[in-house]
Amino acid sequence: MLITGIGLQCFQQLTGTDAAVYYSPEIFKDAGTKGNSNLLAATIAVGVTKTSFVLVATFLIDKLGRKPLLYISTIGMTVCLFSVGVSLSLLKEGVAGAAPALAIISVCGTLAFFSVGIAPICWVLTSEIFPLRYRAQAVALGAAANRVCSGLVGMSFLSVSHTITVAGTFFVFAAMSALSVAFVHLVVPETKGKSLEQIESLFFRITIVGKEAMSRLKMSRITCTNSHLPIDIFNLHVELQFNIRRSSIKN
């Protein structure tokens, strides 16, 4: 549970959306936007996009579910962040064309996907998955991790972008966003329509399945040590994933 809650809070910030908001004028300057009025208009578009899609999320979160929205959010952010990096790289090489407009649209798209998914859902999930007796402490840990990651990204953005360029920084953010897709797939359960007891039992079953798999793995190692045969780790991993998904479906 702690891995799920704190991991989501960290990934919410490590994808660089706060940096995109804080330093949007600098990003748009690198994207070729000229004039203070144009920079102001682009920055306002960022703020309006972020606010609007948070409102959209309030209508979708109980209709589509938490996990589908997280998939949409993290995959969309990965594509948009990568697109920002590509457009800024093209501008760095002197290839203009549609690159400036693509950079602005991609930044706005990143914040739209962020606001419709991982931004609100990480707070919803951290308030749902923890038992009542530990919820206050666990949510506080998640919030602390969120703020620490936000501070690290915000304070390091300019120095990192000067070292590896702004485009390179967005490629790093895109990689972190891609990791968040894998994290959602492997660790985050669907909590839509489930009671607190069902959610707790879901994590308990995943833990039991994992312990059984580890026990079997140890036994396989002992057997293989005696017989000098290789271990079929892949089949054990597939069976573990199947058991986890089957327990999720039953709930």
Image: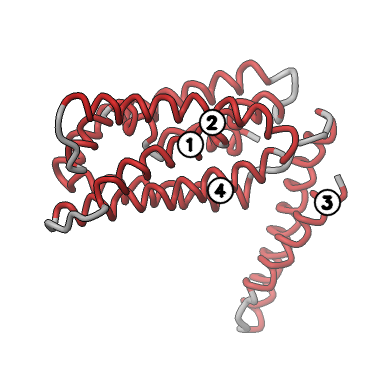
Q: Residue 171: percent from the left, percent from the top?
A: 31, 51
- Which mark's residue is nearer the viewer, 2 or 4? 2
Q: Earlier in the sequence, mark 1 or mark 2?
A: 2
Residue 8 to residue 36: above or below: below
Name the residue carrying label 4.
183
Under mark 1, the amino acid is Ala
Residue 73 to residue 158: above or below: below
Name the residue carrying label 2.
53
In-image side of 221 versus 77 (left or right): right
Q: Earlier in the sequence, mark 2 or mark 3?
A: 2
Q: Residues within 10 Å of mark 3 (few under 14, many from 20)?
A: few
Q: Quadrant of residue 219 in the image?
A: bottom right
Tell me the quarter of the image containing the C terminus. top right
Name the residue carrying label 1.
112
Q: Residue 162: percent from the left, percent from the top?
A: 14, 40
Q: Earlier in the sequence, mark 2 or mark 4?
A: 2
How many marks do you count on the picture? 4
- What residue is rendered at 82% in x and 34% in y? 193
- What residue is rendered at 83% in x and 51% in y? 249
Which numbered tag is attached to residue 249? 3
Q: Residue 26: percent from the left, percent from the top?
A: 20, 32
Assess whether mark 4 and mark 2 are in contact (beta carbons under 8 angstroms): no
Under mark 3, the amino acid is Ile
Q: Earlier in the sequence, mark 1 or mark 4?
A: 1
Q: Earlier in the sequence, mark 3 or mark 1?
A: 1
Assess whether mark 3 and mark 4 are in contact (beta carbons under 8 angstroms): no
Q: In the current view of this chain or complex, which residue is farthest to the left?
A: 94
Q: Secondary structure at mark 1?
A: helix
In-image side of 214 versus 198 (left or right): left
